Each structure stands twice: as C-alpha cells, then as structure tokens.
C-alpha cells in the first residue's frame, strides 16, 4: 500500500498540474492499487487546491475536500491512523532531517512505517530520511 505525499496526491487529482500525467502513469503501472491518505495529506491537498499560484482552477476548501474524498469510495483507499508504533522511529527520522522543510515528511515516513506502507513521493531527497529504505518510493517524473 502506498501513502501518497501531498505533492503526489495533488498531482494525481489536479489535471492541470505539471506532473499529473507522470502521477497517473505511475499509478496505472502498479499491481497493488491500494493507496492511503492521512489528515496531514488531506489537509495539504485542500490547502494547495485553493492556491491560485499553484493551480489555474483554485477550489474552495469544501470543493477540494469533496474532490479528494469522492475518489476514496471503491478505489482501494485506506485512511492511516496517526497513532505512533510501540517502537517509534520518529526520533531517528528527525535526527536525519536537514531543516524545517522536512518535518512533515518525517511524520509521513513515520506513518508509512507504522502502517506497513510505502511513502510515495516525487522528492528523491527524502530517501535518506527513512531508517527503512523500502518505506520510500520515488515516483519517476517521465
């Protein structure tokens, strides 16, 4: 199962995004179609969807939320709980962070590990953060 990071999630469901085709191509190529979101990724999607500097068709928060959640039913979607595991990898992940911009990514990696999922991202810079390399999948942009 793949936990989509915010940028991949936004590209997947935003037709005018520069990486929309790459996101869809990658998803189509998967054998395991299970995918996941969490409060962090859903709120990020809603935030980006309303930003006129990022999309040519900004949506209200409710419109964005409905667009995303409308894709949950019948699509192998799972919602990941944010309860930390007994052996919490977060301290090790945060130790590897190289600044404030990777903090959300650290929490997403933790969620992926705790739920036996893989964080799917366009950002190859995240690979070094995870104490479990198999917990990150960099989606190709071509």
Image (tube, rainbow, N blue to C red):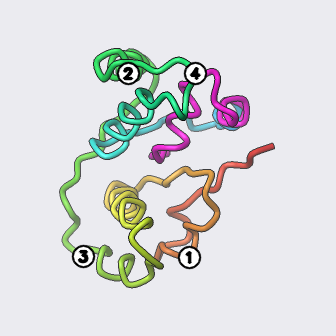
**Left or right, residue 23 beside residue 66:** right
**Magenta residue check for 17:** yes
Disc 1/disc 2 C-alpha distance (Å): 32 Å
Query: As drawn, which residue projects farthest toward the front?
Result: 53
Between label 3 and label 2, give the one nearer the viewer. 2
- Residue under pointer 2: 64
Along the polypeptide, which appears first: circle 3 or circle 4?
A: 4
**Can you give x and y, in whole percent of width and height, for residue 131 in the image?**
46, 78
Few, some or many C-alpha atoms within 10 Å of disc 3 (few <14, some 14-19, many ≥20)? Answer: few
Task: Report if the CB atoms under discs 3 and 2 are less than 8 Å apart.
Answer: no
Query: Could you give the CA–CA distance between mark 1 and mark 3, rounded to whole angstroms?
Result: 20 Å
Q: Nearer the viewer, mark 1 or mark 3?
A: 1
State which region is magenta.
1-25
114 in relation to 18, above or below: below
Location of residue 37 (image quadrant):
top left
| Residue labelled with disc 1 | 128
The reply to whether the magenta stretch includes residue 81 is no
For marks 1 and 4, the one nearer the N-term is 4
Q: Is residue 76 left or right of residue 126?
A: left
Residue pointed to by mark 4:
56
- Indicate whether 84 appears above or below 24: below
The residue located at (34%, 36%) in the rendering is 42
Q: For label 2, count other residues whose C-alpha is less than 10 Å away and answer few (under 14), some (14-19) or many (20+).
A: many
In the visual, does 47 lie left or right of 118? left
Q: Residue 13: where, in percent of width, then height?
A: 53, 25
Q: Secondary structure at mark 1?
A: helix
Name the residue carrying label 3.
87
Which labelled disc corresponds to residue 72? none
Compare residues 67 and 86 and report the one nearer the observer. Answer: 67
Q: Quadrant of the C terminus?
A: top right
């Amino acid at each position: 199962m793949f936990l989509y990071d915010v940028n991949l999630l936004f590209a997947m469901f935003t037709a005018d995004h520069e990486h929309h085709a790459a996101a869809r191509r990658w998803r189509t190529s998967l054998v395991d179609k299970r995918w996941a979101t969490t409060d962090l990724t859903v709120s990020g999607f809603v935030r980006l969807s309303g930003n006129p500097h990022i999309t040519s068709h900004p949506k209200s928060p409710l419109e964005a939320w409905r667009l995303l959640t409308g894709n949950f039913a019948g699509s192998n979607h799972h919602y990941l709980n944010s309860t930390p595991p007994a052996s919490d990898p977060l301290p090790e992940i945060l130790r590897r962070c190289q600044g404030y911009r990777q903090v959300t990514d650290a929490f997403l990696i933790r969620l992926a590990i705790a739920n036996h999922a893989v964080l799917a991202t366009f950002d190859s810079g995240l690979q070094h953060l995870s104490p479990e390399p198999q917990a990150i999948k960099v989606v190709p942009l071509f």
